[in-house]
Amino acid sequence: MGAVVALDALLHERRVWRGQPASLPAGRQPTGYPALDAVLPAHGWPEAAMTEVLPAADGCGELRLVWPTLARLTQAGGRVVLVAPPYVPFAPAWQAAGVVLRQVQVVQAATPRDALWAAEQCLRSGSCAAVLGWPAQADDRALRRVQLAAETGQALAFAFRPPAAACNPSPAALRIAIDARPAQLRVLKCRGGNAPAQPLPFAPA
């Protein structure tokens, strides 16, 4: 007990420096969803990194999740590239979400391998703010190349993958699953911190 009293005295006399947990700076890539930003270590999308989005089914909110970011990026003059999207993008919906269509380019690919190559090149070029891809069958090695390309090009990479991919390890800095019923987000992995234990309601931004 005497040792405790002595330590308190040292602290009171400011003879011992007590470290304080450093707060992370505000994220430079907010998701557009304040509740999601609040639980992510970077307070937004991890910069220059790949984020995996795992929707329960096609169309259950994966584009709605990224539209606020794509709107912000394209309104600032950034280029967004969609590599081999599984469906034809419905331009009026993208426009209604605030995305500047002239800043969006769509790249078609003959094979999944070509799509991965195209995504890697777009990311590595340094001319894209964000690149979206749908690598359903990509292995860990291919995803690592995408992650490295995002780091090299300082771009955001979004990989939309089936929910079964959650069972496999991934080099993605962030993995988010989207549930349809109830509509919610589950952060499965986030670099720099622990994934939140509770899901987040997924309401429109």
Image (cartoon, rainbow, N blue to C red):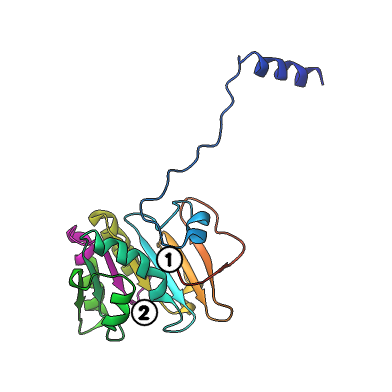
Callout 2, which amino acid? Answer: Gln
Horizontal and vertical percent position of residue 167? 51, 73
Whether 130 is drawn above or below 84: the answer is above
Whether 100 is drawn above or below 16: the answer is below
Badge 1 is on which residue? Answer: 170
Mark 2: few/some/many CA within 10 Å (<14, 14-19, 20+) = few
- Give the side of residue 33 with respect to residue 75, left or right: right
Horizontal and vertical percent position of residue 202? 52, 71
- Give the side of residue 176 with respect to residue 9, left or right: left
Whether 203 is drawn above or below 19: the answer is below
Quarter of image, res 182: bottom right
Name the N-terminal-most of marks 1 and 2: 2
Mark 1: few/some/many CA within 10 Å (<14, 14-19, 20+) = many
Nearest to the observer: residue 167 or residue 178: 178
Specify start and end residues of the magenta stretch as a single range. 121-139
Disc number for residue 137 = 2
Q: Residue at x 19, y 68 (%)?
A: 103
Q: CA distance from mark 1 to mark 2?
A: 13 Å
Callout 1, which amino acid? Answer: Ser
Horizontal and vertical percent position of residue 23? 50, 40
Quarter of image, res 152: bottom left
Q: Quadrant of the C terminus?
A: bottom left
Q: Residue at x 23, y 69 (%)?
A: 100
- Magenta span includes 46: no
Nearest to the observer: residue 68 or residue 127: 68
Q: Residue at x 37, y 79 (%)?
A: 136
Total marks placed: 2
